[in-house]
Image (cartoon, grey):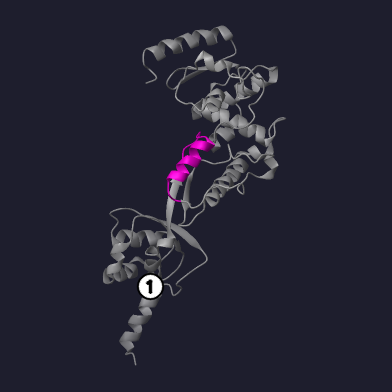
């Protein structure tokens, strides 16, 4: 039989700890290399996992297995006992792999990165496809650039589905999915992919306006990035003249209108700029030097700036 003091001590302990050992509500806790028991306890408390820090610290000190907590992102239940929190931190099935990529990568590049990450199982099938409203099964453009937490055993298809679902959120937030002018959501995604590939964030809205202006008058888009896409090349700012002769619908110098598909996987900024183009009558633009992209409707002015670009490129300003 417990003494009165023992009962009080036991009750005080319970007041400082949750009783539950599991929950349907979860959170992600990042454990970094070098985190102490106190650091981990603070993160668990701030994330809403444990009631107070001192109970977890006491348990961690008294259990040698706490030294085996590994760095990484862990998926932990909310409002659970300190002991349960420790057990879940040691559960390898709750440790998430983090996979991410930047804006503007192509589908082929993303799939290669994912395959090499060793974070997924199996191969890509045909089951993961964009929403039917876009009228395509091609994944290009729908793999949203972000950081993804992948639990052990995540399939290749499962990871791709996460990217598509994240794209839906971004498209909805940017209102890309609503259409703009007479352009369908898929056509807007194609435009956004070109905007992403062609310039820096501060110029996105101007570049999208140039595309709309050229489309309006039936002018070829003359987007270098579309030719880079079909030739699977990158890096050259000045396009070799031979590539302008390529007979492909992606050759926007030779064929008018939009290319058949997106040419990259754009971020939300490019999507927003696509449906919110800046007002202007520009038809041409050229990056004269790093962080200096100029816009004009005058072809002679464009040629003048193009010559300035060539001189700067020859001088090594573009690295």
Q: Please name whichever residue, 37 or 260, is drawn nearer the observer in this view of the structure.
A: 260
Looking at the image, is 61 positioned above or below residue 252?
below
Neighbourhood count class around disc 1 (C-alpha, 10 Å): few under 14, some 14–19, many 20 upward: some
Q: Position of residue 102 (x, y in %)?
A: 47, 37
Boundaries of the magenta span: 100-119
Q: Is residue 110 above or below residue 21?
A: above
Q: Which residue occupies 60% across, 13% down?
A: 297
Residue 84, percent from left and from top: 40, 70
**Quadrant of residue 311 in the image?**
top left
* Residue 183 x %, y %: 70, 31
Total numbered badges shown on the rendered structure = 1
Q: 62 or 236: which is nearer to us? A: 236
Quarter-of-image position of residue 137: top right
Q: Is residue 107 magenta?
A: yes
Kindly give the residue lying farthest to the bottom in the view shown.
1
Q: Magenta stretch: residue 278 in it?
A: no
Look at the image and tell me whether residue 100 can be seen. no
**The N terminus lies in quadrant:** bottom left
- Which element carries disc 1, helix, strand or loop? loop
Q: Which residue is mark 1?
A: 16
Asked where in the image residue 214 lies, by quadrant, the reply is: top right
Q: Is residue 9 left or right of residue 222?
A: left
Question: Residue drawn 54% across and 11% down?
Answer: 302
């Amino acid at each position: 039989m417990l003494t009165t003091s023992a009962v009080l001590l036991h009750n005080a302990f319970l007041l400082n700890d949750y009783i539950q050992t599991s929950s349907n509500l979860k959170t992600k806790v990042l454990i970094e290399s070098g985190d102490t028991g106190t650091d981990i306890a603070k993160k668990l408390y701030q994330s809403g996992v444990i009631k107070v820090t001192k109970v977890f610290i006491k348990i961690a000190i008294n259990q040698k297995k706490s030294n085996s907590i590994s760095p990484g992102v862990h998926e932990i239940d909310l409002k659970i006992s300190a002991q349960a929190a420790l057990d879940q931190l040691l559960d390898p099935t709750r440790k998430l792999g983090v996979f991410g990529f930047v804006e503007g990568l192509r589908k082929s590049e993303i799939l290669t990165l994912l395959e090499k990450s060793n974070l997924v199982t199996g191969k890509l099938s045909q089951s993961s496809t964009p929403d039917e409203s876009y009228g395509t099964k091609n994944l290009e453009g729908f793999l949203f650039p972000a950081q993804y937490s992948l639990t052990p055993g995540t399939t290749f298809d499962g990871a791709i589905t996460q990217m598509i679902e994240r794209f839906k959120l971004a498209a909805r937030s940017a209102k890309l999915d609503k259409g703009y002018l007479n352009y369908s959501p898929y056509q807007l995604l194609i435009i956004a992919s070109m905007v992403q590939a062609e310039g820096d964030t501060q110029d996105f809205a101007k570049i999208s306006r140039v595309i709309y202006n050229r489309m309006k008058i039936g002018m070829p888009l003359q987007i270098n990035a579309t030719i880079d896409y079909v030739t699977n090349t990158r890096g050259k700012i000045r396009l070799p003249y031979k590539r302008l002769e390529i007979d492909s619908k992606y050759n926007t110098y030779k064929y008018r209108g939009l290319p058949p598909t997106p040419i990259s996987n754009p971020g939300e900024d490019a999507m927003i700029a696509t449906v919110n183009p800046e007002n202007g009558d520009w038809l041409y633009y050229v990056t004269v030097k790093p962080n200096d992209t100029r816009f004009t409707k005058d072809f002679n002015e464009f040629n003048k700036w193009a010559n300035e670009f060539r001189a700067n490129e020859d001088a090594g300003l573009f690295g």
